[in-house]
Image (cartoon, rainbow, N blue to C red):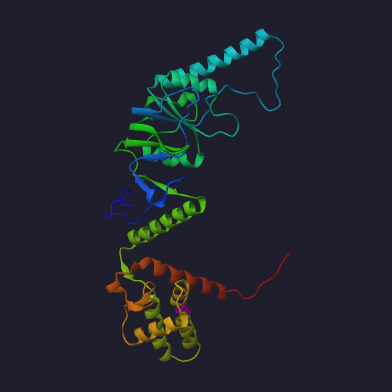
Amino acid sequence: VLKVIDPKTATNVDLNDIRLVKKLGGTTDDTELVDGLVLTQRVSKVAGGPRRIENAKVGLIQFCLSAPKTDMESNIQVRDYSAMDRLLREERTILAKMVKQIAKTGCNVLLVQKSILRDATTDLSLDFCAKAKILVVRDVERDDIEFISKILGVEAAASLDQFSAEKLAPVGLVFEENLGGESSVVRFTGLSPSAGGCVSVLVRASNVLLLDETERSIHDALCVVRSLVKKKALIPGGSAPEMEISQKLAQWARTLAGVNAVCIEQYAEALELVPYTLAENAGLQPVEIVTKLRAAHAQGDKYAGINVKKGCITNMNEEKVVQPLLVSTSSIKMATETVRMILKIDDIVITR
């Protein structure tokens, strides 16, 4: 997070600037923060092109390096060998001109967006790129275009006429790294300082379930840090805030009468569901733990919380268990607003 924001002035974190790249294989300990860009696509090696480029000029195209096709309802009939040779020769000429125009700009690393209408590249176009010493990475997803453009500082070209030297991005080194077996990634290092502040995290795990769980855990951690950036304040964890609020509300309810007292009392009881759930998820006796926690706060120990490791009530400040203030305030506000919205419903009309 600190690589994409300035902690002194930032008030929010755009998690789209932090890309989690999942790659099966290895262990969770192999997960790393990459100083640059990582792509899970492979370098095209059909025609024996380069796999490592230093001082690269990276281009990103959204058009196909293949011969144009006819419309859906049109057909081309070839009746003799001379017409077939002329057709193949024309296709070869078109592809040669396209690759020559790309190479003329100084591009030596080409990222090609994935196409669903026709082949993004052909063996013939890859052969021309290999002869021009251009490293080609195919099947770049449409969703990744914006992030790649921002982190590299490259501008995507929608047509060959728009592809120019000004749209290329300088990169220190582009190479394909083998991760063991048939698994590999493409790394871009030595990015331009003027490029957008983005980072990549290469997530590794031994199976798909663990890989997805690791990604989810990292995303949850990023969300916690983002909450801290939005509101720079920490409070004790272990359900200490919820129980303290519950105790204060219960004391206030005793000083009131009528419907208001009942509403505040029920609100206080609802907050006790948080420590109850925490104790239940930790494998503890929820009724016993919540009773001890309530008693501790009633005696004035406002930092008392549930220690899930020791299975008892301890001081959260001493245990250094903290959480962002925004997490607690947002959850309480959202729950309160939801209940108020439900109470405004007068009747439900069931329709089919």
Between 338 and 80, the one lying in front of the other is: 80
Closest to the observer: 165 or 271? 271
- Residue 19 visible in the snapshot: no
Residue at the (57%, 29%) spot, across then down? 119
How many numbered tags mark residues here? 0
State whether the magenta stretch is mostly helix, strand or loop.
helix
Question: What residue sits 47% from the left and 23% below the top?
Answer: 161
Residue 70 placement: quadrant: top right
Where residue 240 appears, as percent x and y from the top left, is 36, 76
Q: Position of residue 13 (x, y in %)?
A: 37, 53
**Quarter location, residue 311:** bottom left
Is the residue 46 above or below the residue 273 in the image? Answer: above
- Tell me: residue 279, above or below residue 118: below
Foreground pick, 180 / 236: 180
Q: Position of residue 48 (x, y in %)?
A: 46, 23
- The stretch in magenta equals 270-274
Asked if residue 37 shows in the view, the reply is yes
Q: Does 266 sit left or right of 307 as displayed?
A: right
Q: Residue at x 60, y 29 (%)?
A: 118
Is the C terminus in the top left, top right, bottom left or bottom right quadrant?
Answer: bottom right
Residue 222 vertical placement versus 266 (above, below): above
Q: Image check: 287 left or right of 92? A: left
| Residue 327 spot, x, y in % from top left | 40, 66
**In the image shown, does 118 or 50 lie closer to the viewer?**
50
- Quarter of the figure with residue 189: top left
Residue furthest out toward the left? 8
Is 214 one of the magenta-colored residues?
Answer: no
- Residue at the right extreme, as displayed: 352
Residue reaching furthest to the top: 82
Residue at the image point whose x is 52% and y is 29% from the top: 63
271 is within the stretch colored magenta: yes
